[in-house]
Amino acid sequence: MTLIVAMKADSAIILAADSRGMIGNLNDLTAINDNQIKLHSLGNCGLGIAGASELGSSLLDEYRKKGYHQPAPVDKVMNNISHESLDCYNKWFGAISPEKRPGVFITLAGYRGNMSAKPEPMVYLLSSAQNFAPMLMGRYPAMSGVPQYAVYLSHRYYDPSISTERAKALAEYLISETASQDPKVGGSIRMAEITAQNGYRELNEEEIGTISADNTALNQRLRQFFLSGSTK
């Protein structure tokens, strides 16, 4: 399983994911692989891919063979991957109905705009079960995978005016807190920021490590507050 979060901030979209993959029946014996790469760049945008990971990789390969990795705004990328994903699934699975096909879930984040308009952050979800029809997300964080804990926490802590640096911290917190409660989420956290000016940039391990350490210290202070009434 997985947890992918796309969060709009004041000057960027933050895209974050865990790295856990699970093999087997979730109600029975399973094996864990914590080396899954779920974040990717495409055009000037970021992609998070969840579900059947090998099929997701095949779709990503098809996008790149078609040249969709070249710089492009989010609307063009969305149209390209929506049509190409459905074409591939129809070719691979024929008459099998969408709800019975292997599930792939795509989170797309990027900017709409031109030289005369202020760039607008856009986040879409595309699911194989809905024939990869683009679902435009609103102001609040978009999530796929195992979102229950993260949805609760985002409603408590997120605000659309959040700064980019605080959004990075919150995205890490949503995933790490979910991983502490649900074994279907885990492994290293990966994160990227997408801006209108520079497109997709993935954070390195040191940057994410600093964010994680700051969040851990904050959690400890919060626990101390409830135990003693002091954060010292």
Image: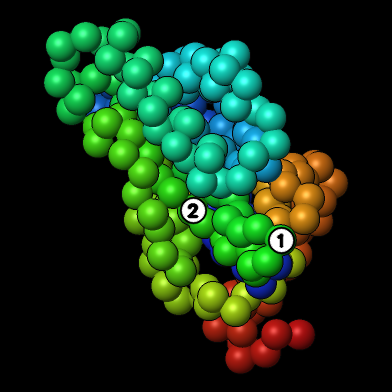
Give the side of residue 118 with respect to residue 109, left or right. right
How many numbered marks does the figure carry? 2
Real-space CA distance between mark 2 and mark 1, rounded to the nearest whole angstrom: 21 Å
What's the residue type where badge 1 is placed? Met
What's the residue type where badge 2 is placed? Val
- The residue positioned 61% from the left and 91% from the top of the image is 229
The quadrant holding residue 201 is top right
Horizontal and vertical percent for residue 61? 56, 16
Give the side of residue 189 with respect to residue 207, left or right. left
Dot 2 crowding, Cα within 10 Å, few <14, some 14–19, many 20+: many
- The residue positioned 41% from the left and 65% from the top of the image is 138
Question: Eyeballing the image, is 71 above or below 33?
Answer: below
Question: Eyeballing the image, is 161 above or below 55?
Answer: below
Q: Residue furthest front?
A: 116
Q: What label sits on residue 123 in the rendered view?
A: 2
Horizontal and vertical percent for residue 161? 60, 79
| Residue 99 visible to the viewer | yes
- The residue positioned 70% from the left and 36% from the top of the image is 71
Q: What label sits on residue 115 in the rendered view?
A: 1
Horizontal and vertical percent for residue 219? 63, 69
| Residue 212 visible to the viewer | no
Horizontal and vertical percent for residue 105? 39, 35
Label 2 SS = strand
